[in-house]
Image (cartoon, rainbow, N blue to C red):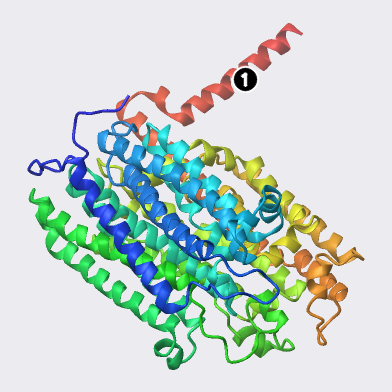
Amino acid sequence: MVDTGTPETATSTPPTPSVPRGLRLVVPIAAVIAATVTAVWLLNVGGGVITEAVLGLPPRDTTVTWLVPLLKLADRLLAVGSVGCLIAAAFFVDGDGGRIRTQAYSWLRIGGWTAIVWGAVVLVHIPAKLADVFASDLSMVSPEAVWSFITDTDDGRVMVLGGFLAIFAGILALNSLTVNSAAWASVVSVVACLPTVFTGHSAAAGDHQIAVDSMLLHVTGAVLWAGGLVALLLARRTRFTAAQRYSRLALIAFIAVAVSGAVNAATRLTTLDHLVGTPYGLEVLAKIGALVLLGGFGWWHRRATLPAVEAGRPSAFRRFAALEVVLMGATFGVAVALSRTPYPAPEAAETSAQARLGFPMPEPMTAATLLGDWYPQILICTAAITGIGFYLAGVRRLFKRGDSWPIARTLPWVGGWLLAVFVTSSGMGKYGMVLFSVHMMQHMTLNMLVPILLVLGAPITLAFRALKPSKERGLREWITVILHSRFVRYASHPLIALGLYIFSLYLMYFTGLFEWAMRSHAGHLLMIGHFLAAGGLFFWVVIGPDPAPNRPPYAARVLLFFVAVVFHTIFGLTIMQSTDVIAAGWFAEFERDWGATPLEDQTAGGGIAWAFGEIPSVIVLVSLVWQWSRSEDREGRRLDRLAERAAKTGRLEDDPHERYNAYLAELADADRKAGLRE
């Protein structure tokens, strides 16, 4: 059942009038009209709609050339509505004992049905996309051709994945009555926005790794920013708590959209003439102008309209937000036109190696190129900046209220993220794509050394100390919910964590997964993420100072670590002795005329895997011994306090030392009686 009684927040604010449903729908409809008009106009003037015949193929069908971008626009607008409503249901209002309230239920219904329609639009988009790729009309598209497109092409696969994820998010939302299930639905809906990024406009750029990674951040930030505001306008009442939470989310999303958009544009607009002298560049300028205006709207919200909502006058917020949503709709129209507009060709022709790698083939490896030839891994850099920034903000909050935080925790956390950035964004990131030995150095660092440093930073403990408890479900409460979730309890079981850490290593390199991860940027990102996640989970269980659901005794932790070391050693020796090249097809494509042969390089990589564990082993063992000794000291002090309390109260039976002495005396007496009987 859904609670229909108490308000979402304990904050005492004047009652706000409800808004009729018809008025709530006016603004989204106006935003859709603005998006459509903007997209159609820019597609016309910018060359995003191509109707000329292609040599050797039938003339392009005008219906298809217009249908594809308009379906993409519908895809994005429906994603905004769905994601926004589901995020709002999970995080903008508080539940009643974990169960959703009336407004959240309304958002879930809207977001759920919107997500199902969104998924259907994505699936309908597939035959239109097929006709567009082969410059044919829809009558030429057969079920067999659609099936082949889905099974044999990346475009088809990601569209099916995105469509079914959207439908799944909708079904999950429509069957959600708790805050936790609403949160899962919102997460799935955000993920559903991302698969098509890997085959979109950004994937065709010369620096496609940077372009795709920045677009992942751009799309995520855009749908959260616009979607959250749409959800607030669809609400019957504008409550201060919801508006305040959206404001915080919008600030983060704005920064992500602005920075990622600038990085993405820089991969294609390499000169000033490209920016001001091409349709693509002019559309980028239009999008920048819209972003600046929207940033001004956000500043005004925080300065003027949020205080008005807190005072019980939400009308100013709704009027201002309505204009902002319409401008956001027009901006999405610009974005869709931009995704179809040809971007300026690079000055130098793209080589086959760059088409596969996203950057030119590296020069022969030297210490200078390995350390200095940087190619940023955008997602890792973003995670590092975010992780370090929030961590230092938490430390600063503790210091401001007079508490302390050990530098021995801060340095490992900062050092771990900087090390992750170095091994993925320095020359190691480039050479790791063409040399197995450098890749293995990356793997061992990301899987062992970086997680150890991050775990020793104790970020969860810092969060619990820096964040104040709240009657509402804030960030501190969400961390608690996650720590006590069934998934975390299961995954953090020592044997499960050990299995994920070890056997996924063998699965990655002794099946076809490694070559797939090298050929697919999505696979490469998943591989890096898995290295960090599996290592972080294992070392959290073994040496983590943070609270964990399943923390084995210290002796068991030592045993777990040594088992992991043994399997790592066997893995390294197996690779060293192998006569077959792992991912031979991938490494053979580059035809390097420098460095070791692929087999010799692989043998060196096996040696790295075999020998790398020495430094991490020292860190882990020192940490375990130190933690073990401190736990013994804490236990000794606890027993001494109990003994002192027993002496003061005269209740010697409460003294643990006396109880232990009595236990020994009972054993001695039992042995004496047994001896007499014999």
* Number of numbered callouts drawn: 1
Q: Is residue 293 left or right of residue 527?
A: left
List the single residue furthest toward the top: 677
Q: In the image shown, does 422 or 615 lie closer to the viewer? A: 422
Which residue is denoted by mark 1 in the rendering? 667
Image quadrant holding the C terminus, namely top right
Q: Nearer the viewer, residue 163 or 452?
A: 163
Is residue 518 visible to the viewer in this orientation of the structure? Answer: yes
* Quarter of the figure that contains the N terminus: top left
- Whole-percent x, y for residue 555 in the image: 64, 44
Viewer-proximal residue among 1 and 136: 136
**Residue 426 x %, y %:** 59, 80
- The answer to whether 355 is drawn above or below residue 450 in the figure is below
Residue type at mark 1: give it. Answer: Leu
Mark 1 lies on a secondary structure that is helix
Q: Is residue 6 above or below residue 279?
A: above
